[in-house]
């Protein structure tokens, strides 16, 4: 018997998609570990993750996760998240309708003379604010979609980028309804 | 935890009583209907043990190792449908329980495991016998708690029972620091829960159920594929399944975990499916045009090669856990709900509608199944001089079938032979470690079963390698007068490892032979149990009878053919229609692809 098989190749390459998930959870000790442990334990990707308490009275936190996977894996991720006891709701903002996703970054740039002027001009074009300045540096605050922040950072590279701190993506659905 | 994840709908009517945390544990166990708890004392649970000493509501069963405690609680839970409970100390007590917890998570067994913890002020200080119990057990429990205030304790304990037993059952750990056990607080009785986040769905979608019934009525080659979910759902689910299978006339197969939900004696039963399933069950899976999966999860031991899995069928999947659906295999009609409830609805819809199944097609389907059956895939060549393991199980079945019998197993070849040759007619009679495959499961599980059913016959079908993993629990069985029977199929090898080495690794038996085995008869005697050795097929019946008659724990050392392999077998990475039979053993190595060898 030969070692080849008459079946098609085992892994049919399914398209990998990116999704933004909002997860409403009880703000209890270990809840983030449960969510992150689920991703690492099952080999899912995390591109971005943000978390903060959003409803203090009810002790509810909102976690925004940007993840990637095939449609089948993405469905698994949602079901697995939903199964966790402290998880109240899981919403896939990418598929449920129009949504807005934003990120905030602080970008430190160092330079003098023309470089400094160029940095300021670019910041102005991107509506970034100066939130700290010395004679040889600026810290810009920029808010926007991830790709806008990405292009701002890329532009800052030649003018003296020192470091970047980013919040990761937060997102919300458009329209009057809540999750 | 500052806020309840579960809100009490109504406050407890009677005013709460003040007591210590340790007393609350006992009170909560009693209020939850717990009669037995398996455990092992230690520094961080001494207050609870002190409380145990001063009451008689809950009986404590002292095991010899914490892993044994968890498996015993699993056996207890699976044979009764109740929540199994465990009490262990911090540090090593908790880490020793981890295998059992993982086992219970894989097989959806409801457990509440209480672990002691170092006092709250010492947590994080690397104190003596401290470990991050909630951190370690987070991925191997359905949920877990670290109780940091005695005021939370009653609610957490009641929640733990609710979460363990509702939805898809599973183990829940409650980690209680020693100072919380000493602290005084107000105890409250369990109340009705209104969950904010945790609300498992039990009722299936009515539209989908109608659709499922229509698909069933239209099917030409239908098949039920049922799993442990039917057993977990309770006796009513098994009864409904039987009714539906009879009503439709469809063939039925089941996973390892689902054995007993449908009686093996029935002509519609095709036997177990999967890696060591029957020829007819696996071919039916491959060739069916409608698969009705009930409480089964398309595990890799079931599906074999996933892209060649039942290629021509529509699939209906009924499961209480939405994450089980579309995980491995894409299905056409998912129904989230409790098996018992959904099957009941299906029955009602089927009866109410005037659907006429295609009788002619079904006749052809059954004729095809009869051809597969004629292959007699479980046939083996018996011997007059040496005991064949299959023969031993067959005789064990014949001599115990008319009794009130419960079977547990360890893991390996003996487990598969038990599944193939022991005929289960009722649910909750078969306790085996399916998902995790834990050697050492069977003896402690048998102890738990025997405790719950003191007058029944409880047999642990074992291998000589597995049994040594938790042999110490024999001492527990003797202490509590639990007459469990350990029926060892002794081939001196870790049989399944040896089988794979023979078939896949050129017969290089790397460390799968046990050169220094104990004398099991003397070992039994050392434990004050009864030992029997059987080496010849002629002696088998008499000695099995002796085993049954002795009202003591028994170790039965059944010396079997060391070279016997377990067939049929779907080699890893192959499809259902590429099953190997016993006579094909020599060709197996060729039959497994390089990619297949990478699989387990």
Image (cartoon, grey):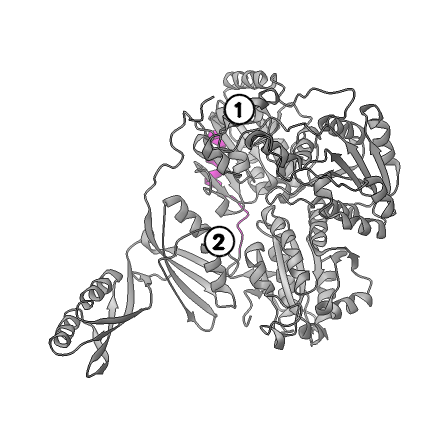
For the N terminus of chain B, which image quadrant? Answer: bottom right
Chain identity of mark 1: B
- The residue at which mark 2 appears reads as A41
Left or right: A179 in relation to B577? left
**Residue B322 location, x and y as percent?**
49, 47
**Magenta stretch holds residue B210:** yes
Disc 2 packing (10 Å; few <14; some 14–19; many ≥20): few
Q: Mark 1: which secondary structure?
A: helix
- Give above or below for B322 relative to B305: below
- Give above or below for B420 relative to A67: above
Of residue B325 and residue B99, the one placed in the foreground of this image is B99
Left or right: A37 in relation to B137? left
Residue B283, label in figure: 1
Write the residue at 75% across / 48% down: B448
Q: Mark 2: which secondary structure?
A: helix
Left or right: B362 in relation to B33? left
Magenta residue span: B199-216
Residue B380 shows in this picture: yes
Residue B355 shows in this picture: no
**Residue A1 location, x and y as percent?**
47, 21
Of residue B449 and residue A9, the one placed in the foreground of this image is A9
**Residue B318 location, x and y as percent?**
52, 40
Residue B385, label in figure: none
């Amino acid at each position: 018997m030969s070692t080849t098989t008459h079946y098609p190749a085992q892994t049919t390459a399914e398209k990998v998609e990116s999704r933004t998930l909002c997860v409403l959870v009880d703000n209890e000790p270990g809840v983030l570990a449960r969510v992150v442990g689920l991703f690492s334990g099952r080999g899912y990707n995390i591109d971005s993750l943000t978390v903060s308490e959003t409803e203090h009275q009810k002790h509810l936190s909102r976690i925004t996760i940007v993840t990637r996977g095939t449609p089948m894996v993405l469905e698994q991720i949602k079901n697995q998240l939903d199964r966790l006891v402290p998880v109240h709701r899981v919403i896939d903002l990418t598929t449920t309708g129009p949504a807005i996703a934003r990120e905030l970054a602080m970008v430190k740039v160092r330079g003098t003379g023309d470089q400094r002027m160029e940095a300021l001009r670019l910041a102005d074009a991107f509506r970034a604010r100066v939130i700290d300045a010395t004679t040889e540096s600026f810290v810009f605050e920029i808010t926007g979609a991830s790709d806008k922040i990405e292009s701002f950072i890329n532009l800052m590279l030649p003018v003296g980028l020192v470091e970047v701190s980013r919040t990761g993506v937060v997102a919300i659905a458009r329209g009057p309804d809540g999750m | 935890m500052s806020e309840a994840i579960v809100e009490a709908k109504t406050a407890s009517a009677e005013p709460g009583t003040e007591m210590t945390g340790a007393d609350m544990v006992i009170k909560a166990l009693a209020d939850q209907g717990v009669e037995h708890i398996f455990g092992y004392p230690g520094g961080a649970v001494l207050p609870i043990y002190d409380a145990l000493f001063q009451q008689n509501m809950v009986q404590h069963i002292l095991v010899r190792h914490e892993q044994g405690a968890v498996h015993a609680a699993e056996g207890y839970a699976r044979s009764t449908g109740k929540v199994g409970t465990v009490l262990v100390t911090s540090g090593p007590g908790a880490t020793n329980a981890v295998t059992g917890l993982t086992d219970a998570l894989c097989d959806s067994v409801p457990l509440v495991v209480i672990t002691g913890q170092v006092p709250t002020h010492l947590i994080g200080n690397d104190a003596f016998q401290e470990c991050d119990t909630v951190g370690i057990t987070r991925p191997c429990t359905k949920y877990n708690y670290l109780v940091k205030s005695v005021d939370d304790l009653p609610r957490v304990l009641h929640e733990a029972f609710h979460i363990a037993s509702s939805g898809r059952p599973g183990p829940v750990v409650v980690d209680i620091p020693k100072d919380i056990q000493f602290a005084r607080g107000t105890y409250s009785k369990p109340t009705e829960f209104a969950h904010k986040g945790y609300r498992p769905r039990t009722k299936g979608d009515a539209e989908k159920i109608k659709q499922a019934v229509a698909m069933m009525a239209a099917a030409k080659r239908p098949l039920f594929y049922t799993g442990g979910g039917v057993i977990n759902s309770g006796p009513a689910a098994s009864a409904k399944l039987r009714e539906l299978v009879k009503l439709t006339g469809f063939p039925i197969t089941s996973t390892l975990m689902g054995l007993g939900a449908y009686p093996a004696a029935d002509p519609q039963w095709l036997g177990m499916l999967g890696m060591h399933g029957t020829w007819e069950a696996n071919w039916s899976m491959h060739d069916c045009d409608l698969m009705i999966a009930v409480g089964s999860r398309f595990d890799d031991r079931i599906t074999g090669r996933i892209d060649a899995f039942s290629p021509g069928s529509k699939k209906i999947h009924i499961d209480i856990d939405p994450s089980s659906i579309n995980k491995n295999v894409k299905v056409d009609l998912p129904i989230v709900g409790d098996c018992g409830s959904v099957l009941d609805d299906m029955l009602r819809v089927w009866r109410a509608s005037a659907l006429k199944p295609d009788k002619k097609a079904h006749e052809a389907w059954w004729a095809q199944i009869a051809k597969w059956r004629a292959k007699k895939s479980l046939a083996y060549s018996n011997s007059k001089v040496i005991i064949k393991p299959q023969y031993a199980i067959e005789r064990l079945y014949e001599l115990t079938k008319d009794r009130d019998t419960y079977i547990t197993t360890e893991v390996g070849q003996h487990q598969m032979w038990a599944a193939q040759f022991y005929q289960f007619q009722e649910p909750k009679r078969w306790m085996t470690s399916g998902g995790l495959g834990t050697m050492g499961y069977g003896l402690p599980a048998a102890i738990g079963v025997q405790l719950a059913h003191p007058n029944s016959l409880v047999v642990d079908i074992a291998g000589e390698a597995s049994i040594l993993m938790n042999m110490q629990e024999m001492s527990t069985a003797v202490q509590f007068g639990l007459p469990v029977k350990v029926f060892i199929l002794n081939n001196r090898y870790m049989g399944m490892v040896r089988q794979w080495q023979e078939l896949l690794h050129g017969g290089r038996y790397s460390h799968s032979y046990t050169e220094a085995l104990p004398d099991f008869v003397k070992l039994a005697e050392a434990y004050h149990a009864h030992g029997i050795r059987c080496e010849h097929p002629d002696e088998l019946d008499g000695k099995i009878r002796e085993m049954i008659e002795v009202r003591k724990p028994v170790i039965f050392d059944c010396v079997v053919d060391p070279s016997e392999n377990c067939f049929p077998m779907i080699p890893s990475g192959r499809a259902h229609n590429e099953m190997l039979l016993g006579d094909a053993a020599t060709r197996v190595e060729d039959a497994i692809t390089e990619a297949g060898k990478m699989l387990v």
